[in-house]
Image (cartoon, rainbow, N blue to C red):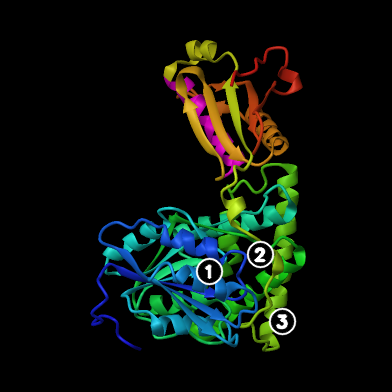
Amino acid sequence: MTSHAADPVAHAGDCSVGVMAYNEEANIADSLASITAQQLTGGRRVAELIVVASGCEDKTCAIVADIASQDSRIRLIDEPHRQGKAAAINVFIDAARSPLLVLVSADLLVKDGALDALLSHFDDPAVGMVGGHPTPVNDETTFLGHAVHLQWRLHDRISVKSPKLGEMVAFRSVVPSIPLDTAVDELSLQAIVGQLGYRLVYEPRAIVYNRGPATVADFLRQRRRIYAGHLRVRKQQGYSAPTMSSWVIARALRGSGSFATPKAALRTIGTILLEGCARALGTYDVIRRRQGHMWEISPSTKQHVSADAHADHPHNVAVFHIVDFHRQRLEVGAHASRQLTRRVADHVRQDFGSAAIVSIIQQTGTVIATLPGNRADADLAARQVVRRFESTQVRLNDCGAAAPPTLAYAIVAFPSAGPSLATAVPGPAHHSDRARTAAS
């Protein structure tokens, strides 16, 4: 390995960013712009941005060359033949001159502040590699959109406890190369850095936008390749990704909001079946010793990312109100009434999942939740919250008394364009004689 520590142009806070590209004309300009626009703190800087273009047959190289003519930090390495992403990464590692290296996929957009959040962890000398938080731009109201969002939502929940790093990673320049036949380059890097004794960190603030598969065929192809790659890393490098464990995935599914509505539950079950099929195919590929380091590109993942990443996606505000809350407070006391409001909020969080942002107005017995998606799904989820809560015995005080609360709710939907649509919806029919709709 070439040492970069003594390089006169390298400073302690420098990083070299590597972008591996194969036919990325749709996204490469926006991806590079999102990187060069990053504002770094603490003496850190992007010293160079190296694009390794391997066997590109489109306008990728021309686009990068034009951008490089306007920014001296950008360097293009044009390889005439495609040899796989791992080989391109090794070219980048050999060419980079900074003590910190960053890998960014060419079809990603890096959110403002993400790179700084990623690099800030290297102030701790024990940290060897940090991974960002991939966020898909797919429409979550479709089945494949649900599948892709579920995949990355579980990735986030798992990585908080057991880092699984991918899409955008930063690591110390201590890795000479990665295996050329790996199809999961970030995991191979993670295995090497971890085995060198460094600590791995997942940084959820380092958000990068990507586009997942939009067809079943592309989803299966991608997930099949990744699982086969995980199996090979486990065999060759003695390292298992946290997502290999079905038990870990099952625990992450709990409380993720994946079964909040009947439609969401059906889509989640369908996603689980697809993932199981992909893992079976990936296992078959490993048994048959099929190479996966030069994979077929999934066309639906290479569509333009920028427009959807910056779009104002539909979201909803659900307002839950405890009917006759002031009377309840007089009957059970201030402490118990606050307890009751918190119990409502707990049910909302459980049913809506991690995508919802929940807040409480204690004085009025009101719980407010914002969540993405369409209004119909939000309405079904809110009805489920009401039904489940009102069928639960809520014990509020030390005497063990239970209050039979009644909830009313309203949904305010904000579409991506046009005026907001507000609709007040009463609680279940059997409470309609005494339910009052909450004002939004």
Mark pair 2, 3: CA separation: 24 Å
Helix or strand or loop: what does disc 1 sit on?
Answer: strand
* Residue 336 appears anywhere in the view: no
Tell me what residue is drawn at x 44 percent, y 68 percent.
169
Question: Which badge, 1 or 2, is on the more N-terminal residue?
Answer: 1
Q: Is residue 350 magenta?
A: yes
In the rendered view, tell whether residue 218 sits above or below residue 379: below
In the image, 60 versus 370, the foreground residue is 60
In the rendered view, tell whether residue 121 sits above or below residue 417: below
Pointer 1 local density, CA inside 10 Å: few below 14, some 14–19, many at least 20: many
Marking on residue 105: 1
- Amino acid at pointer 3: Tyr
Tell me what residue is drawn at x 52 percent, y 67 percent.
242
In terms of image quadrants, where is residue 389? top right
Between tags 2 and 3, which lies in front? 2
In the image, 109 versus 147, the foreground residue is 109
Q: Which residue carries the number 3 mark?
A: 284
Range of magenta residues: 335-353
- Amino acid at pointer 2: Thr
Q: At which x and y percent is residue 132?
A: 46, 61
Tell me what residue is drawn at x 49 percent, y 16 percent.
332
Pointer 3 local density, CA inside 10 Å: few below 14, some 14–19, many at least 20: some
Q: Which residue carries the number 2 mark?
A: 301
- Amino acid at pointer 1: Ser
Q: At which x and y percent is residue 302?
A: 65, 65
Q: Is residue 326 magenta?
A: no
Q: Quadrant of the N terminus?
A: bottom left
Q: Is residue 267 left or right of residue 110?
A: right
Q: At which x and y percent is residue 330?
A: 48, 10
Q: Are circles 2 and 3 on residues that touch, CB within 8 Å?
A: no
